[in-house]
Amino acid sequence: MAGSVTGDAEIAGSSTKRRSGGWITFPFMIGTLLGLTIAAWGWLLNLIVYLIEEFNVKSIAAAQIANIVSGCICMVPAIAAIASDSFFGTIPVISVSAFISLMGVALMTLTASLDSLRPKPCETASSLCQYPSKIQLGVLYTAITLASIGTGGTRFTLATAGANQYEKTKDQGSFFNWFFFTTYLAGAISATAIVYTEDNISWTLGFGLSLAANLFSFLVFIAGKRFYKHDKPLGSPFRSLLCVIIAAVRKRKAVVSTNEKDYHNESITTIPTRSFRFFNRAALKQEEEVKPDGTIRNPWRLCSVQQVEDFKAVMRIIPLALATIFLSTPIAMQLSLTVLQGLVMDRRLGSNFKIPAGSLQVITLLSTCLFIIVNDRFLYPFYQKLTGKFLTPLQRVGTGHVFNILSMAVTALVEAKRLKVVQNGHFLGSSSVADMSVLWLFPPLVIVGIGEAFHFPGNVALCYQEFPESMRSTATSITSVVIGICFYTSTALIDLIQRTTAWLPDDINHGRVDNVYWVLVIGGVLNLGYFLVCSWLYRYRNLKDDDNDKDAVGSHSTTLSS
């Protein structure tokens, strides 16, 4: 990765006339990413604990709120992508989003520093707790909303803006390598330093550090604006997709032709592919639909072959996106349930250090970060030498499915062991904390991190290379949207389990969280079968070009984005 940066920097330095974009923008983009990620994860990772300890929210309710917030953060990139692609471009959207995030984190810091913005703490040895007032909840939710919108608005848009600074696929791939390495590194910093500060020093200082990181990133991004290549909005890609549907429906009685001259092409004369043949009618020329100069009279009656193929590319991704929803739902549930498990396990390391429950996710972050490098530099090249082929995005996603199922199974076994310790009455003193080390949770968290190093880059690479060029920002946000849906489905699933079983009470010592994980294992196996069928039927649109470019494939292997 360093070699790519250094080599291109020397080439750029020898140029007598510097264009906008290129590697000169790299430190500004990465610096912005570093600060924004530290800020976002600094308050998000420990949100469950903050709600329980400072706002007297019940544990399962806090987990559900955190899932909803995480879902919002993952859904906002779609709105930001549409705004970038259609109206404003990526740079203005990032600037505004970073400022909104700054306002949200500042307000969150106020909730921690002002006693009037929080309810009184629960009385010692008492179950009676004061519920937060409407004003207190209003300020809290406003802070969370602003911070979520700002975080979501920058996350994938920043990835697209950074990649757009480079002309070569190799350079884009190198940027993605650094982008996602920085993302997980910043997440690890937040999960350790900031979360530890919040748990052991003060919430005010912890959130204050997040605020400082956000301010730093905002200033860095603004400072680099004169170097950026500003991408021009290409108009709404969704309008083009809708035109294809309407034009095809209007011509539903027309006979699909096999003659390429019967179809409207804007440049190279081609014929639409045979898949989704019904929509080929949208590009089928009829009387007086084309002007003498070759332009279309009514875009709602006639589309180009390229528009039709772009529409088909999006349609082909949908079944695979559904599989990703059921892949990521267990991960979203594990994210919140692990925090609850950590709160009732022995988190001591030595006599003076106690692992914060919100910091447990750093294991997953570090595992993913490490295996991104291992995969890109060792595993994928070894696979290529061994087979003579490149590991495709779908193959990487499938491998991630397997590791994810394994992680849920191991987590179920660990929870079963913890419940046995509880049933035998082995607690730390008079507390409800089981006499079982939290280190037992590390193996499943490592495994899920390995899986994420496969399926997350694979999903983003698939969307980035298969989607139309006019939807690049939208493409990089698709995975985020799918993950956002997963947080909502995980919240709904937790609520369903609470309503229909006794597995998830507020005190999980009296529940059966292990059964929840076994349900996720069964669902994961069924989803893997569905994914394999979809993958077998899928035909790549741009894979051939990537296979002819070794560097391009290497870059796609880490198009993890954010």
Image (cartoon, helix red, strand yellow):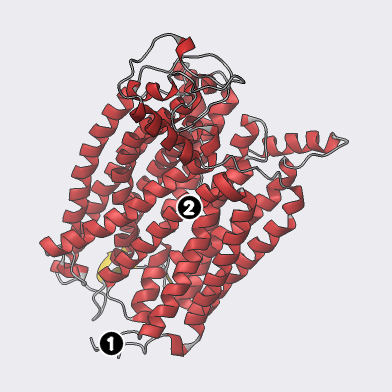
Q: Is residue 81 visible?
A: yes
* Viewer-closest of 232 and 401: 232
Q: Earlier in the sequence, mark 2 or mark 1?
A: 2
Q: Is residue 24 above or below residue 342?
A: above
Label 1: few (<14), some or many (≥20) within 10 Å?
Answer: some
Which residue position is annotated with label 2?
Answer: 79
Circle 1 — which element? loop
Residue at the spot 19% in from the left edge and 55% down from the top edge: 516
At which x and y percent is residue 258? 39, 9
- Looking at the rendered image, the quarter that the N terminus falls into is top right
Q: Is residue 398 above or below residue 194?
A: above
Circle 2 — which element? helix
Q: What amino acid is labelled 2 in the image?
A: Ile
Disc 2 to disc 1, how far (Cα)? Answer: 39 Å
Residue furthest out toward the front: 288
Label 2: few (<14), some or many (≥20) within 10 Å?
Answer: some
Q: What amino acid is labelled 1 in the image?
A: Cys
Q: Is residue 494 above or below residue 118?
A: above
* Viewer-closest of 114 and 254: 254
Q: Comparing marks 2 and 1, which lies closer to the viewer?
A: 2
Would residue 143 be found to the left or right of residue 35 on screen? left
Q: Is residue 512 visible?
A: no
Residue furthest out toward the right: 16
Residue 96 quadrant: bottom right
Would residue 555 be found to the left or right of residue 200 on screen? right
At which x and y percent is residue 542? 49, 24
